[in-house]
Image (cartoon, grey):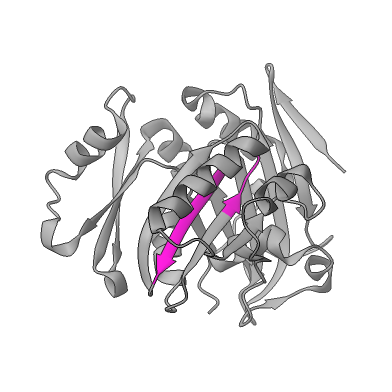
Amino acid sequence: MKKFFYLSCTPVKSVFEIFPKVYNEEDYSILCELSCEGISCTLKKLEDGKYCGVGVFHFDRKISNGGLHIALQILFNSHPLFSKNFPKSTIVYSHPESVLIPFSLYNSRTSADVLNLLHGDVESKSVVNTDIITEKSYYNCYRIREDVNKVLDQQFPGSNKWHQYSALLGKHSSTENKIYAIFYSHKIVVSVFLGGKCHLMNTFYFNTPEDVAYYLLAVKQQTGIDDLPIELSGFIEKNSYLFTEIHRYFKNISFAKLPPLCQYEENLAAYPQHYFSNLFALDTCE
């Protein structure tokens, strides 16, 4: 059942709320993935590492980047989940303003300049964070609005933080050639791995299924591999027009599975695995 929370004229929509009816907050950790579209959360038992809850909350699409911190405050002040004091919390940023820099080229004094060069410098005050991806010999430098960062620090003091791209780089270590596409309401996060190496990683915003097909075809063309398989995760239905449009151009399509080394409560297993597979894979259960 979808729910709405209002403060002034700005709604926050509850898309999924799959939580235990009763639980002791001190026994659980929370992970939140934040994007401009909304915030998704998982609850995991600290004792045995079993996942027992998922929440997906969408912001009104009319909210600009400058209103993101207000939308977060709406949700944090309205929903009982965020009144809990979990002993362990993790924030994962799913924002496109990121740049991967090889170890040999990294300079901490110029990382902000590189971000401004690639993503523009019209943004208001921002905080620049850096993830170290040791196994891939990359630094991932990314920026978050200062007002958003402040709201998150107040809500989740002492939380672990990293970027979605950093998690994706460490996730796909096999030599299989494949496109991975994570679907949100109005964007897809696409990564391409060839021979165990990351060939491309980017975020594309879309309005129509034709937009998605165009971006994925452009990505495939860059690889020069005609029969490149694609794995889909996130919010895409197998019987949707969006899937049909993708299937016109990609014949080798699969849907992501839940991370196999994790445990899940039965109420989570009742949903298609690809809905939440990427969200669970952001954690360190494996």
In-image side of 26 versus 165 (left or right): right
State the residue lying farthest toward the right: 1
State the residue lying farthest toward the top: 9
Residue 75 sits above or below residue 239 on the image:
above
The residue that appears at 64% across and 58% down in the rendered structure is 233
Q: Main secondary structure of the magenta part?
A: strand
In-image side of 179 versus 26 (left or right): left
**Quarter of the figure with the N terminus:** top right
Q: Is residue 158 visible?
A: no
Q: Is residue 240 visible?
A: yes
Q: Between 50 and 239, which is closer to the camera in this rendering? A: 239
Magenta span covers which residues?
Answer: 182-194
Q: Between 218 and 201, which is closer to the camera in this rendering? A: 218
The location of residue 19, given as percent across then percent down, is: 78, 59
Judge whether residue 189 is colored magenta.
yes
The location of residue 199, given as percent across then percent down, is: 36, 60
The location of residue 39, given as percent across then percent down, is: 60, 45
Q: Between 244 and 81, which is closer to the camera in this rendering? A: 244
The location of residue 111, given as percent across then percent down, is: 19, 45
Residue 276 sits above or below residue 204 on the image:
below
In-image side of 126 versus 155 (left or right): left
Q: Between 85 and 11, which is closer to the camera in this rendering? A: 11
